[in-house]
Image (cartoon, grey):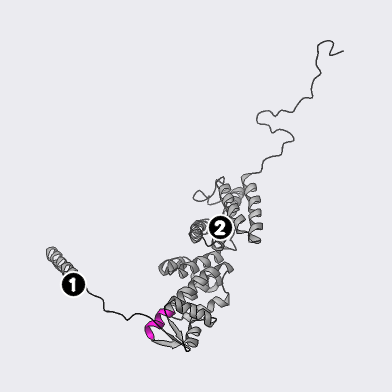
């Protein structure tokens, strides 16, 4: 009858949201913080199974997600709200994991960048709960500076920490003691410290680097002090585990190993030639300048 009268049957009315009123039955989008937090859980799973390729990819995505946070340094508030604190904690945790991934992938420039960013959180965001990773990471940074022979920077970073912390915290005390052993020339203590394992497990790379540096120092001192030394004694001094490893080390430095004796092949020191004309010219110029001033 309706069709005969030219009338059409009405379709069921669709729910249309009014301006400013959320539509019914729609799933709300996750907030930026919730999305980043969910992504961080995926990263942690990849980190636990040591899937470094996935870690690097997820870490890049996490950093992109951090761009949506509005309360990160240098705009971090001194008294953050609950949501702002959540952003800061997430960002700090992401950067901390970034330092660990950088070591595992031997990307030391990335490690340095993460450390520089983290120091802002550790120093300027005192309202945040303390991080259990802070001192292991700062200890790793001290170990890096020591292994790279950047002693001045090492002391600068160490002096930023309270003295009682330097003496009590195992992650800070360990590199401080290593530096003291090096300054005293107690290289054997540095070499044996690697076997103690008194450092964060991620620090093994820096310990290997430091041990190589110390072995080179011992080798150079031995070359200057002796013409030859017994292979067994040198193996003990260098804390090298096998004779074959000693031979490989000797080959790198042009030493000769024969009949249980290591003979150093260093070149005789020659007196340095003084650039006489340059020295005279600079002395005369200095004298003229001094006379003019007086």
Quick one: which residue is furthest to the front in this view? 258
Residue 247 location (% of width, % of height): 49, 80
Q: Residue 152 sits in which quadrant?
A: bottom left
Say if the magenta span includes residue 237: no
Q: Is residue 169 visible?
A: no
Q: Residue at x 46, y 76 (%)?
A: 214
Q: In the figure, is residue 145 to the left or right of 6? A: left
Q: Residue at x 61, y 45 (%)?
A: 32
Quarter of the figure with the C terminus: bottom left
Camera-nearest residue between 196 and 281:
281
Q: In the figure, is residue 209 to the left or right of 294? A: right
Residue 241 location (% of width, % of height): 55, 81
Residue that numbered label 1 is attached to: 276
Q: In the figure, is residue 220 to the left or right of 46? A: left
Q: Which residues are magenta?
A: 218-225
Quarter of the figure with the N terminus: top right
Residue that numbered label 2 is attached to: 98
| Mark-to-mark CA distance, 2 and 1 | 55 Å
Contact check, label 2 and label 1, Cβ < 8 Å? no
Tell me the element at label 1. Answer: helix
């Amino acid at each position: 009858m309706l069709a005969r009268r030219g009338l059409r049957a009405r379709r069921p009315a669709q729910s249309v949201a009014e301006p400013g009123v959320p539509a019914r039955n729609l799933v709300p989008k996750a907030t930026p913080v919730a999305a980043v937090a969910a992504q961080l859980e995926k990263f942690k799973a990849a980190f636990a199974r040591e899937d470094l390729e996935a870690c690097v990819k997820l870490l890049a995505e996490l950093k992109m997600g951090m761009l949506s946070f509005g309360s990160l340094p240098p705009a971090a508030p001194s008294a953050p709200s609950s949501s702002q604190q959540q952003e800061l904690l997430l960002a700090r945790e992401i950067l901390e994991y970034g330092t660990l991934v950088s070591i595992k992938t031997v990307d030391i420039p990335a490690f340095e960048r993460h450390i520089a960013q983290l120091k802002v959180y550790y120093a300027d965001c005192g309202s945040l709960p303390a991080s259990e990773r802070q001192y292991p990471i700062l200890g790793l940074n001290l170990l890096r500076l020591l292994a790279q022979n950047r002693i001045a920077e090492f002391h600068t970073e160490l002096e930023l920490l309270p003295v009682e912390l330097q003496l009590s915290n195992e992650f800070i005390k360990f590199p401080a003691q290593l530096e003291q052993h090096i300054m005293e020339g107690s290289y054997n203590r540095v070499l044996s410290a690697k076997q103690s394992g008194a450092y964060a497990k991620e620090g093994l790379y820096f310990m290997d680097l430091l041990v190589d540096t110390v072995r080179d120092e011992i080798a150079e001192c031995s070359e200057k002090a002796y013409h030859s030394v017994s292979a067994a004694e040198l193996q003990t001094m260098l804390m090298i585990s096998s004779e074959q490893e000693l031979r490989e080390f000797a080959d790198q430095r042009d030493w000769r190993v024969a009949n249980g004796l290591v003979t150093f092949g260093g070149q005789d020191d020659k007196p340095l030639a003084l650039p006489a004309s340059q020295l005279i010219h600079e002395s005369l110029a200095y004298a003229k300048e001094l006379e003019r001033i007086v």
